Amino acid sequence: MPGPNHRSLLADLTLEEKASLVSGSGFWHTRSIDRVGLPAILVSDGPHGLRVQPGDGDHVGLGDSIPATCFPTASALGSSFDVDLVRSVGAAIGGEARALGVSVVLGPGINLKRTPLCGRNFEYLSEDPLVSGLLGAALVDGIQSQGVGACLKHFAVNNQETERLRISARVDDRTLREMYLAAFERVVRTAAPWTVMCSYNRINGVYASEDPWLLTGVLRDEWGFDGLVVSDWGAVDDPVAAVAAGLDLEMPSSHGAGPRAVLAAVQDGGLDESVLDVAVGHLLGLLDRAVPGVGTSQAFDVDSHHDLARRAAAECVVLLTNDGPLLPLGDDLGRVAVIGEFARSPRFQGAGSSKVNPTRVDDALGALRALLGPSVTVDFAPGFGVDDPAADLDRLAAEAVETAVGADVAVLFLGLPPSFESEGFDRTHIDLPAEQVRLLEAVAAVNDRIVVVLANGGVVSTAPWQHHAGAIVEGWLGGQAGGSAMADVLVGKVNPSGRLAETVPLRLEDTPAFPNFPGEDGEVLYGERIFVGYRHYDLVGGEVAFPFGHGLSYTTFEYSDLDVAVVDPVAEPVVELGVESGVPTSDWRGPVRLRVTVDVTNTGEREGKEVVQLYLSELDAPPPRPVRQLRGFDKVSLAPGGSATVTFELCERDLSRWSVRTGGWLLHPGSFEVAIGASSRDIRAQRTVEVVGEPPAPPLDRSSTMADWLSHPVGHDLLVEGLRTAPGGDLSLLLADEDTVMMLGSFPLNRLVTMMGDAMGDGFVEALLGQLSIAGAGSAD
Ligand code: BGC
C-alpha cells in the first residue's frame, strides 16, 4: 500500500500556512493544518530513554514524564564498544517511542568529549570520532528500525555547557573535518537519520542555526542528508536567516514570532518563497515517514526492556584495576562490607532534558545480597550523604569504618552527586567529593581489601586515591538497571568487557583543552586542534591514569598472526575524495587500501569478550599528525581457549587527512603503521606497510615556494628547465647544493625573482605558470 503523500500538499498550502510550519506547536509537536489534512507529530527526548511529557508539556519542558525504560547513558554505552548491543538499545527505545506515540526521538547526542569538564559528557559517547560515529549510527539504526525517527544532535561543535547558547567555537577546518564533524558525517552517510538537530552555539562566529555552510553545504550537498533539520530548543536567533541557511523547523514554538518574520521576509522579497518551500518540503517529507507509525503499536514489554537495560549496563562496566585479583567476589567470602550511599540509592542518569522517569530502579546492594546468597553476610553503611548538607559526615564515616573492620572485602560505592554535573553547566574540577575520598582513606586504614565502584557521567580523577583500592570498577551512569548490572559484574555472573571511550587523566591540568576552556568574551579557541583525548597524551608522551581503550577482564587474551595486505595499489590509484566531486554516499570512504587480519585467543579460564582495537599511524606525512588514531574496533566473544580471526578493511578515507589547501581529503603515500592494541597504550602487534601513489601536489600559484615547485610532479621539471635557461645564466646549479635548497626552499618564487633581479628576468613565474597550464597541470591563478 503506498504511504501517505504529504509532500504533494505543498502546492495546496497558502504562503501564510507554509510560513506557519517553520515553527512548532507548543513544546513537543509540529504544527497541523486541518484545512488540508496535515497532521502534527510528537517528538520527545532522548537520548537514553524517553521523556514524554503528558499533554503538551509544561512551559520549560522539564516537568514530569511518563515512565519509560532508562537505559545506560551514552558515556556508559560508549564504553561497551558493542555496535550490536547499542543497536538493540536503540531498537528498544524506538519501540517505546512507538508505544508512546512519539514519532522522533531526540537523540543520539554524538558530540566529542573535548574536555572532561563538559557537564553534559554523560550524554556523549566518546573522545574519539570513530567510536562516536559507529555507535551513534547503531543507535540511529536501532531507533529507526521501529519506524520512528532519530534526531542526531547537537550539530555541531557543542562541547561545553558554559555559555552554550552563545559561545563561538573558534576551530580550524582540519580539526572540524577530522574530529568534530567526522562522527556526524559517518552517521548521516551510513544510518540516514530522519532528522538532525542544530546546536545552540556559534562556530567561527556564525550560529549553527543560521550557518548555510554547515546546514546546507556540508550536511546536504556533501553528505547527502535528505531529512529535516530542527533547531535545538530555543536555538533560533534570527528566524529568517535560519530558514535561509537550511533550518527547517524551529522548536519549541516561538508563538508566531518565527512564522511572522518569515512571512514578512517573503512578502518584502528578503527571502525567496522557493527557500521556504524547501524547508516545508522537508517537514512534509518527515510526516510521510512518520505518520504511518503513529498509533500502530502495542504497549512495550517493561520487563524485557529492563532485562536489556541490565545486560547493556553490564557490558558498559569498565574494570580499571583488579589486583589480587580481588574480583570477582566469590560465595566463599564470609562477610562483605558494602559502603556508600550509592549502593542503596543509585545515581544512574544525569540531569536536564535527558532525564527519564524510570519504570523501576535496581540498587546494587539488594542485587548483591540476592546474588551472593545466604552464605555471605553483606553489611551496609552509607558512609556519606548524596547532596545532603544535613548529613553527619563524621558519624557516617565512623559507622562505615566499623562495618569494614574484619570484613573479607570492603566494596565502596563512590561517585559524583547530581549537583556536580548536569546539562546547563560545566564542572570546575574532576575530583570526587572530598568527604568520599576521606571515607575511602579511613576505610582503607582498617581493611586492605578494597574495591571501589564508581558512578559518574564525566570521568573522575583516580590518581589522588587509587593506591588505596585493589580493584576499581567504573560503572558510569548505568541506567535503571545499573545497580543489578554492577552486582552481576562484581560477582562474576558477567565478565566485564567495557573499555574506556575516553582517557582518564592524572590531573585536570594535563587535559588538552585546559588552557583554552571555557573561553572568554564569548569565544572559545580550540587551540589543541585535532589533538583531543588520547591524540594529545600520545603526542606529548604524557602519563595518564588510564588510557583510552583500557579495560580488564576476568580472563586474558593473546594476539597473534597480524597480517596487513596492501590492496592493489596500482589498479586502484590514490584518488582525491574531493568534496565538490559529490562522492556518492555509498562510496564515501573510497576504495579499500589495507586489509588487516589478526587472531585473538582467550587464554584464561572464563568466557569473555575482548575489544580488538586497530590504530593507524602515518609515518611519512608531514606534521602535525597524531601518533596513532583508532581506525577500527571489534568486540569478540570467546570461550576459554577459543580464538577468532578479526578482519578490518581500511579505505582511502581512513588513510587520509583533511587538506585545508585543497578543501578535500588527501592521502599522503608512504609508510603507515598498523597497530593492534588492547588499548591505545597496550599495543600487542604492529606492522609497517608502504602505500604507494603520487604525493599530493599543492596547486601552484604566484606565491608558491621553491619547495612547492620542486615537489610538484610537473612543476619540478618546469622550474629546473626555467632556471637552467635563465637570462643571467644557468641557475639550475643552485639546486645541486642541498644547503641552498633548504635555505631558499621556503621562499615564494616570485620573491626570489625580485631579489635576483636580471638573473631570472621579468615574468619568470608567469611564464612557468603558463607552461604549467599548457601541460594540463593547472594553476590556481
Ligand atoms: C537540549 C536538547 C533537547 C532539547 C529538548 C535542549 O535544551 O539541548 O538536547 O533535546 O532541549 O528537551
Image (tube, helix red, strand yellow):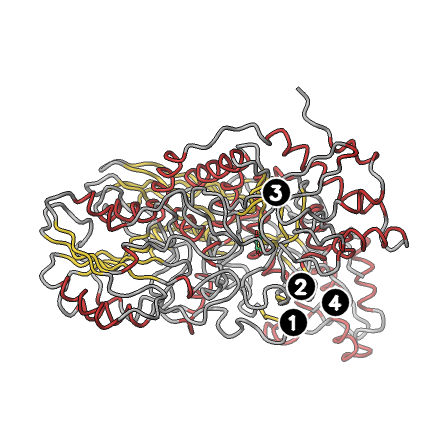
Give the mark nearer the N terminus: 1 vs 2.
2
Amino acid type, mark 1: Gly
Q: Are marks 1 and 2 in contact (CB under 8 Å)?
A: yes
Local SS, label 3: loop
4 vs 1, front mark: 1
Give the mark nearer the N terminus: 4 vs 2.
2
Q: Are marks 3 and 4 in contact (CB under 8 Å)?
A: no
Which residue was labeled with disc 2?
710
Which residue was labeled with disc 3?
588
Which residue was labeled with disc 1?
745
Give the mark nearer the N terminus: 3 vs 4.
3
Residue at image x 55%, y 48%? 692
Crowding at mark 2 (Cα within 10 Å: few <14, some 14-19, many 20+) = some
Amino acid type, mark 3: Trp
Q: Position of residue 737 (x, y in %)?
A: 61, 73
Which residue was labeled with disc 4?
724
**Whole-Å distance between the Cαs marked 2 and 3?**
32 Å
Q: Are marks 1 and 3 in contact (CB under 8 Å)?
A: no
Horizontal arrangement in the rendering, residue 367 relative to residue 594 (left or right): left
Q: Are marks 2 and 3 in contact (CB under 8 Å)?
A: no
Residue at image x 63%, y 70%? 736
Q: Residue furthest top?
A: 1
Q: Residue furthest right?
A: 268
**Whole-Å distance between the Cαs marked 4 and 1?**
17 Å
Give the mark nearer the N terminus: 2 vs 3.
3
**Whole-Å distance between the Cαs marked 4 and 2?**
14 Å
Give the mark nearer the N terminus: 1 vs 3.
3
1 vs 3, front mark: 3
Between residue 217 and residue 44, name the one nearer to us.
44
Question: In the figure, 698 relative to 573: above or below?
Answer: below
Name the image quarter holding residue 341.
bottom left
Local SS, label 4: helix
